[in-house]
């Protein structure tokens, strides 16, 4: 699956998750040898319980069985975003402005792929990050993975 198909899968799953009263934070797909993993992150006011994950897992699993958007075998995991919350959308980068984050780009930008710093939101479609006292602007579409660094 590519990033674009992740986006399409998110569009497929979002209504079902929201109908149950949860926010679909995002999805990740990990092709790992014979064991592919589809991880669905959900959230709600007050946090997520195991029962919440089970409820969403049943709904999403049924929908995936009917729509069959992923060919082959995979394991479905439904999880809370946790303390090291992944950031998927422009709204996430705005919402968690002021947080310490680490992120990785698909390809090197100015000779590097990994960045760690303080998030300063979005500016003209680019993620604004302060790294070692310098402002860095990274195009949102170039970001492969981003997470909050907990504990600060």
Image (spheres, rainbow, N blue to C red):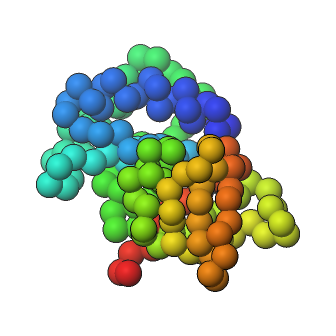
Q: Nearer the viewer, residue 54 or 99?
A: 99
Q: Residue lying furthest right in this view?
A: 111
The quadrant the N terminus occupies is: top right
Residue in front for this viewpoint, 126 or 81: 126
In the image, residue 120 lies at what x, y percent? 51, 63
Number of labels in the image equals 0
In the rendered image, the vertical position of residue 105 relative to residue 124, given as above or below: below
Quadrant containing the C terminus in the rendered view: bottom left
In the figure, is residue 146 to the left or right of 55? right
In the rendering, at what x and y percent does residue 116 appear? 59, 74
Which residue is rendered at x = 47% and y = 32% of the image? 10
In this rendering, the answer to whether 61 lies above or below 110 is above
For the point 81% across and 62% down, which residue is it?
108
Between residue 116 and residue 11, name the one nearer to us. Answer: 116
Q: Residue at x 51, y 72 (%)?
A: 118
From where the camera sits, is residue 143 visible?
Answer: yes
């Amino acid at each position: 699956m590519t990033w674009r198909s992740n986006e399409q899968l998110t569009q497929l799953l979002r209504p079902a998750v929201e109908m149950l009263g949860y926010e679909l934070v995002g999805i990740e797909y990990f092709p790992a040898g014979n064991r592919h993993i589809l991880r669905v992150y959900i959230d709600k006011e007050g946090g997520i319980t195991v029962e919440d994950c089970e409820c969403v897992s049943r709904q999403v699993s049924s929908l995936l069985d009917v729509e069959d958007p992923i060919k082959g075998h995979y394991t479905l995991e439904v999880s809370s975003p946790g303390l090291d919350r992944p950031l998927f959308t422009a709204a996430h980068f705005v919402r968690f402005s002021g947080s310490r984050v680490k992120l990785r780009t698909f390809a090197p930008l100015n000779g590097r792929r990994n960045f760690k710093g303080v998030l300063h939101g979005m500016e003209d479609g680019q993620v604004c990050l302060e790294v070692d006292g310098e402002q860095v602007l990274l195009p949102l579409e170039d970001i492969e993975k981003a997470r909050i660094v907990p504990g600060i």
